Every structure is written in structure tokens, then in C-alpha cells.
């Protein structure tokens, strides 16, 4: 029957061969032990309509269906029969599911009517699509809640983002707590069209939820992460609190915290000095600036300022800038390059205070790649400034000191 329908380019419909058979014909086949199924007798004429809460009125012509199996030849009832009886006996009021189930609704509605059950309200939600508008699948990346958790996503961010795939509250607002979603959600605002799963948007939203966490909760979350990954030997304390406060703006995922802290602790000075972006800084008498900075370190002025905290650092920077007749970018860019080994990063003062604390508190693991202030100044003393100006960079010996 299927082959004939296929040749005629028609949907495969059971022709009802045994629906009109005589008792004698049926008994003859039973006597032979011929396998049999139970089928639902579908009316030949008319149509069936339902009012889908998302898609509106949906109708089917009954002559396109044919009598369908409800119990297989092995005695096992099929899905459409089971789910209808199951939902009806549990008094399910709303069936909300993917649009892929829409064809099943016709069979289930017929069974509801035949058995005298009250029919629930149906709502068929559009599929979540990949960026290429194909059905989202495993080949597009993480597919389970557990995987997203391991990638550093928060439960509340996942719920918020998934709720917005095909739904909105009618405003431009995109940030919702679970309580707000419960209050504002209505099936009437669910869209008919498929929604694109945007990993970039999900990452951004997770960053918003991370930023909204109370300071204590965020510190505990990130501190435990740093200890579990072996960057730190402790998960709480003043260093962790200050590090989280300094780095949190650059963290969208909990896992981003690893790179943020490792980057702060590192000292990639060769990369910074070789960068074309550093050329103006290098040409602005950076070698002389470095000599003055080394002198401030050797005299104990810089370390003394760091010991005094933020106020001490601010006072030292002001005096140091005045002594060199520098301020603003001409002061802070060379300071950043020489002290952090980077062209960009979080607040230089807070960074230096944290690096000083890292050197004295003992919570940074040996394998974290931390380059101490003492090691940084050893590297600065080894620099061949003439070679650097000529775009040469013999820093092998200096790099060895930092290892």
C-alpha cells in the first residue's frame, strides 16, 4: 500500500482491507495464527479542528489519515494511544510541546473523542534553530544541561535565555529572574516562528546574571573555581575577594575567571614590547622611564607605597609623575607596560596592589605561572634598549629569569 501511494505521490493511507472483512475471513486468518493489530476506525468524511493556543485554528481532512494502529501485533500499545489515555487519566489541562508533534495531535484528538475524554488545550511551540536555521542538534555544540554547567553557565542565565527563545513580555526587557518569568509568562506571547539559538547572546546574558549576583555569592563561586583548577591553594580570603572585584567585569562565564586571573599573574613583556601598538610608548623615552622605575623599586618607595594600599599607590604615582613631568597617558601607559607586561587590562593601581598581595599572601599555586614583582624588575634590568629600538629583542636570558 505504501509503495502504491508513493508512486502516485500520495500520503500513505491504510485502505481498510480488514475493516469490512466477514467474520469467516477473520476467523480463518486467526486459525492460521496470522499476526494482527488493533486499529482505530477513522471516519471517512469530514474534518477535525483544534484551536492551538499558539497557532490558532488547525484542521485536518480525515480522508488523509486512514485507520491507524493503536495496538501492535505483539500486543504493545502505540505512543499515541498510550499518551492520550495517560494524559486523560491524569487530568492534564495543557499539552505544550514541539511543533513536530502537531501531526500526532489529529490521532490523539480522535482517541479523546472516541473514549469520551475531555480534550486538553494544545500549544505547539516552534523548534529552536541553529544559526544556519537548521534544526539544533549535537553537531552545533553542547546539548545537555550538564555540559552547559561545565562550560561555566549559571542555571538562572540558562532559564532566562531559553525563556526568550520564542517568547517576550512585550517590552524590550531581556533580563528576568525566575520569579519575574513566572509572573510575566503567558502562552499568548509565544511566537509561531522558530527561534535562533545564539551562543554569543547566551554568553552575554550569563555575564549579566553573574554581575547581578551578590558579592559574597560571586566570590564564593569564583574562589571555588580557582581552587578546583589549581590556580590558587585557597578558595576564600582577602586576595580572592579583591581579585574577584577587580576582574569580574571581564568575566561572562565562571570558566573565564581562570584566564582573567592567570592573565593578571603573568608577565608577557616580550609580547608587549614587540607589539606595533607599543611603538609610540617605546619611542617616548621608555628606557629612561624604566631606569627611573627601577630606581623607585630599588629604593623601596614603590613597595612602601603598595604596603600602604590604595592611598599609598595614589600618592606615589602622583609624585613619580611630577618628578618625570608626566601625567595621563604618557605616565600610565609606560607604567602599565613595564609593571604588567601588557598594553591593556584592569585598573593599574588595583592590579599592582593585588600583585603585591599575591606575592605576600601565599595563596597562588606554584604552577599558576605567577611572575613576582622581584622577577619582573630582574627582567627589566636585563633589557637591551638599543636592540629594542632597532626592532630586535634578545630577551632569552631575561625570559629565563622569569621561569
Image (cartoon, rainbow, N blue to C red):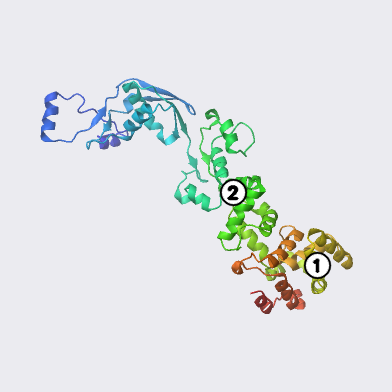
Find the distance from the CA under tag 1 to the CA under tag 2. 41 Å
Question: How far across and how far down the image is residue 95, in percent?
Answer: 43, 30
The quadrant of the rendering that contains the C terminus is bottom right
Q: Is residue 89 left or right of residue 267?
A: left
Question: How far across and how far down the image is residue 150, in percent?
Answer: 52, 53
Q: Nearer the viewer, residue 218 or 94?
A: 218
Q: Residues within 10 Å of mark 1 (few under 14, many from 20)?
A: some
Q: Nearer the viewer, residue 256 or 67?
A: 256
Quarter of the image for residue 376 reads bottom right
Element at badge 1? Answer: helix
Q: Residues within 10 Å of mark 2 (few under 14, many from 20)?
A: some
Q: Is residue 284 visible?
A: no
Foreground mark, 1 or 2?
1
Question: How far across and how far down the image is residue 342, in percent?
Answer: 71, 64
**Measuring 64% from the left and 60% from the top, which residue is drawn there?**
261
**Measuring 75% from the left and 60% from the top, which residue is drawn there?**
348
Compared with residue 222, is residue 391 higher up or lower down, i.e. above or below?
Answer: below
Element at badge 2? Answer: helix
Quarter of the image for residue 19 reads top left
Q: Nearer the viewer, residue 303 or 323?
A: 303
Q: Nearer the viewer, residue 216 or 347?
A: 216
Compared with residue 72, is residue 326 higher up or lower down, i.e. above or below?
Answer: below
**Measuring 57% from the left and 43% from the top, which residue is drawn there?**
156
Q: Is residue 321 left or right of residue 84?
A: right
Disc ID at residue 85: none
Name the residue tied to disc 2.
203
Name the residue tied to disc 1.
304
* Disc nearer the start of the sequence (1/2): 2
Query: Mark 1 touching mark 2, by CB under 8 A?
Result: no
Compared with residue 154, is residue 34 higher up or lower down, i.e. above or below?
Answer: above
Extreme residue toward the bottom, this view: 397
Question: How far across and how far down the image is residue 188, in percent?
Answer: 54, 28
Amino acid at each position: 500500500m505504501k509503495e502504491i501511494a508513493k508512486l502516485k505521490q500520495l500520503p500513505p493511507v491504510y485502505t481498510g482491507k480488514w475493516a469490512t472483512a466477514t467474520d469467516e475471513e477473520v476467523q480463518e486468518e486467526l486459525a492460521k495464527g496470522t499476526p494482527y493489530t488493533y486499529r482505530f476506525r477513522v471516519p471517512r468524511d469530514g474534518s477535525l479542528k483544534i484551536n492551538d493556543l499558539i497557532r490558532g485554528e488547525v484542521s485536518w481532512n480525515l480522508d488523509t489519515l486512514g485507520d491507524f494502529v493503536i495496538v501492535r501485533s505483539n500486543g504493545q500499545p502505540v505512543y499515541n494511544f498510550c499518551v492520550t489515555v495517560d494524559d486523560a487519566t491524569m487530568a492534564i489541562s495543557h499539552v505544550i510541546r514541539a511543533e513536530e508533534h502537531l501531526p500526532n495531535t489529529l490521532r490523539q484528538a480522535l482517541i479523546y473523542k472516541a473514549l469520551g475524554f475531555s480534550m486538553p488545550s494544545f500549544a505547539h511551540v516552534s523548534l529552536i534553530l541553529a544559526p544556519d536555521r537548521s534544526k539544533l542538534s549535537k553537531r552545533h555544540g553542547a546539548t545537555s544541561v550538564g555540559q552547559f554547567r561545565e562550560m561555566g553557565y549559571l542555571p538562572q542565565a540558562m532559564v532566562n535565555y531559553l525563556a526568550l527563545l520564542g517568547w517576550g513580555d512585550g517590552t524590550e526587557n531581556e533580563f528576568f529572574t525566575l520569579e519575574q518569568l513566572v509572573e510575566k509568562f503567558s502562552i499568548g506571547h509565544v511566537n509561531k516562528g522558530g527561534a535562533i539559538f545564539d551562543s554569543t547572546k547566551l554568553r552575554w546574558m550569563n555575564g549579566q546574571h553573574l554581575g547581578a549576583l551578590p558579592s559574597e555569592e560571586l566570590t564564593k563561586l569564583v574562589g571555588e573555581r580557582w581552587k578546583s583548577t589549581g590556580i590558587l591553594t585557597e578558595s576564600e580570603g582577602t586576595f580572592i575577594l579583591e581579585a574577584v572585584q577587580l576582574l569580574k567585569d571581564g568575566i561572562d562565564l565562571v570558566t573565564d575567571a581562570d584566564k582573567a586571573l592567570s592573565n593578571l599573574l603573568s608577565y608577557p613583556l616580550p609580547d608587549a614590547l614587540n607589539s606595533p601598538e607599543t611603538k609610540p610608548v617605546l619611542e617616548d623615552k621608555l628606557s629612561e622611564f624604566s631606569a627611573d622605575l627601577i630606581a623607585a623599586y630599588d629604593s623601596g618607595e614603590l613597595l612602601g607605597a603598595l604596603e600602604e594600599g590604595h592611598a599609598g599607590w595614589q600618592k606615589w604615582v602622583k609624585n613619580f609623575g611630577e618628578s618625570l613631568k608626566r601625567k595621563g597617558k604618557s605616565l600610565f601607559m609606560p607604567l602599565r607596560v613595564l609593571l604588567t607586561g601588557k598594553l591593556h587590562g584592569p585598573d593599574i593601581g588595583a592590579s599592582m596592589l593585588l600583585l603585591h598581595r599575591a606575592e605576600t599572601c601565599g595563596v597562588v599555586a606554584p604552577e599558576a605561572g605567577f611572575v613576582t614583582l622581584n622577577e619582573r624588575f630582574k627582567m627589566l634590568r636585563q633589557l637591551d634598549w638599543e636592540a629594542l629600538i632597532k626592532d630586535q629583542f634578545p630577551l632569552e636570558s631575561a625570559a629565563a629569569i622569569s621561569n
